[in-house]
Amino acid sequence: MNRLADETSPYLRQHRDNPVDWYAWGPEAFAAATERNVPVLLSIGYSACHWCHVMAHECFEDAEVAALMNDMFVNIKVDREERPDVDSLYMDAVQAMTGRGGWPMTVFLSPDGTPFYGGTYFPKDGFLKLLPAIDEVFRTRPDDVAKNAKQMMKAIDATAQLAPGKDIPTVEQLNTAVQTLGRAFDRDHGGFGKEPKFPSTFNIELMLRAYMTSGSSAAREVIVTTLDAMAAGGMFDHIGGGFARYSTDRQWHVPHFEKMLYDQALLAQTYLHAIVVLREPQWRQVIQDTIEYVLGTLTHPEGGFYSAEDADSLDAHGASVEGAFYTWTPDEVRAALGNTKPEIVEQALAYWDITDEGNWHESGPVGDRAGDDPGTTTDADATEGADADAGAAAQDTAEVGPIVATGRSIPNRIAHRDDLVRPDAMSFVRTRLLEARSTRPRPGLDDKVLLEWNALFLSALSQAAAVFNHQPWLDAAELNAEFLIDNMRGGNGRWYRSWQENGNPPARHDALAADHAALIDAFTRLAEATGKARWIAEARATADTLLDWFFDPGLGGLYTTAEDGEHLISRQKDISDNATPSANSMAAIALQRLAALTGELRYANHAERILQLLAPQVDDKVGMFSHALLAADLMRRGTTEVVIAGGTDGDGAEHDMADFVRVAHSIWRPDAVLAWGEPYDSPLWEDRTPGFAYVCKDHVCSAPSATTDEFVSALTGGALAKDTVTKAADTVDTADTAGPDA
């Protein structure tokens, strides 16, 4: 057992029995490399990464490989989810050298931490050739090592040197992005570009803004086709709910089966926004199934949300197989349904496309991708070296194998994408199949609690609880917020990024800018859902910490790490939207919304400076800045502030404003913020009369509304009739009966 046995990360602990003499990231490892004058071998991955497990089995569990690693290097293992700051530094270096990146990522560093060579996945044979080649280069060619390191450091330092523009992203840039996404749209199968297909929720949200502005049928087609296609495909778990990370094919059929908390958060939120705007009833079950999956499977008893489930699990023969937990044969379905009427069984097999020959084919490695932008090429199953000597040893990596039929089926509705609302009989069958599936060996659970990802899901859950008027979800949201405060905030008020129950201490690693930005938004959304002033106070405190410790007063924007944080080889800025929104784009939205609710101009001014930093970058890779463009769109439109004043008026009359709150929650506007319930220190609450609702634009208010009819007219500009709003609320309102099959 090596040093990783004492770590909190499940990914690191998976490697505790390796014969490799692993170190966790920290000064001890670099001191050892300096003392021995050997390079550092840095291996970065995460627990749900299929190809990380493959390389671990082929290389790190192998005595021959481990002997070379221990003799020639100081070996460091990093969980990219715990330390995205470290991951980002060296991912930029690997992408600069090879033109691609992914996980597992393998980087060779000088003892001072500067990288000089890197790649992604290496099979055993290639790795055995690479290790002595790297050792020789380091010992005999220091000038070449220094040259490579200089080039890689230039890529690493790039974001810290970016100069801001004079303005935030323009309307023309917004329009160009929408047009570019329209051209990349796959009209047959939804999404953008070719396989592999990522959810790209920010792109869908941007198209939703375009539709809300223009009523464009083309924008609506992009949204509906994509959301329906993802919900119909095998990337969505039709039996247990929730989404896998991405699809390996154009049809959204065959996923990499790992399930990440952040995907559940971002997809639930996008489907929620879309159902409120477009009123497509089939998305309701997608939202409910996804949320109930997280609450039922990824939730700590005290309220924290776990990070992920692996792609691999044990099959019937005891072999670890990707997708074994999620796939079916007809005989397995029949056995699970027992005495169910034969016609219902056959209907279920046809409904989810479960056939004797199977619908799932394995075609060899496809890799774990670094980003979700259709323009990025980040294969983890191929590595090409920039240095001729070292690179030659790694040329023969993984080859794509022949297509092999598995005889198993991934439940899907691809052939019936226009018929997604589950009939009652299939809901009954789904429950039985879920019970049967629960007896299988479950994929590995990554039970660490990450602040950023929890905040993302807390935000989505708060919004869904409000829209669906579902108290159990709201209770879960508040329980999660209390968990984060109780367990992941130190006595000095500063936050930690990661928590794991068995750790000593459980909370570790200083929170990063992305953690704070996501948390500001989550607390704000929770305040809007509950009407409790406490959550606005928490949002303000978190925003103040973010701006005091992470903001660059010179060039603008947020550094990834705090001013008083660990000194890495570069202090980067997280600017690109990938699988999750960048810290800067998240903060730009969260700070604007908090400024609107509190009247604090400091927040709005810093949001503007963030967007000025991002503006010159937007045109380079449109898909990498869609969330930033959402923030720019919000700033250009300005915020709409909604205040619903309840309580006792001057005559002693009590005003229950629940109907007004219900209307406000049922009409989603991306530019609107909502204050109701407990007043707090803000211009929004000044001189408000109980029994009235106020709709304001940049803190200039229209006449107060005394009835819900007047309120609807003020909120929608008269575009929606009262009966339309009532019907809309009925569409999503599940009161106290909401559930996966409600």
Image (cartoon, rainbow, N blue to C red):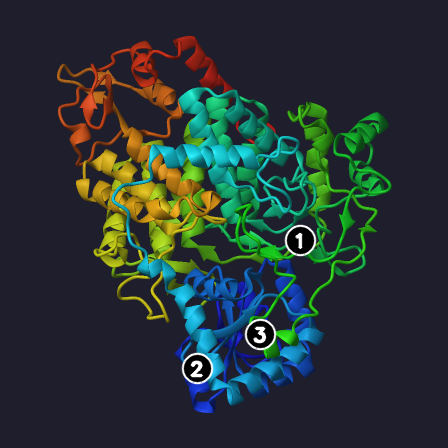
Q: Is residue 46 visible?
A: no
Amino acid type of the residue that numbered disc 2 sits on in the rendered structure: Pro
Q: Quadrant of the C terminus?
A: top right
Query: Which amino acid does the dot numbered 1 rest on?
Result: Arg
Which mark identifies residue 111?
A: 2
Q: Which residue is mark 3?
A: 16
Residues at badges 2 and 1 in contact (C-beta under 8 Å)? no
Q: Position of residue 679 (x, y in %)?
A: 21, 32
Q: Give the residue at x 52% y 73%.
A: 117
How many numbered marks appear? 3
Residue 442 is marked as 1
Q: Answer yes or no: do the residues labelled 2 and 3 have beta carbons within 8 Å?
A: no
From what the image shows, is residue 124 above or below residue 362? below
Disc 3 crowd rating (10 Å Cα; few below 14, some 14-19, many 20+) is: some
* Residue 43 image-quadrant placement: bottom right
Classify 621 as above or below 469: below
**Of helix, strand and loop, which one carries label 2?**
loop
Q: Is residue 30 left or right of residue 595?
A: right
The residue type indicated by label 3 comes to: Arg
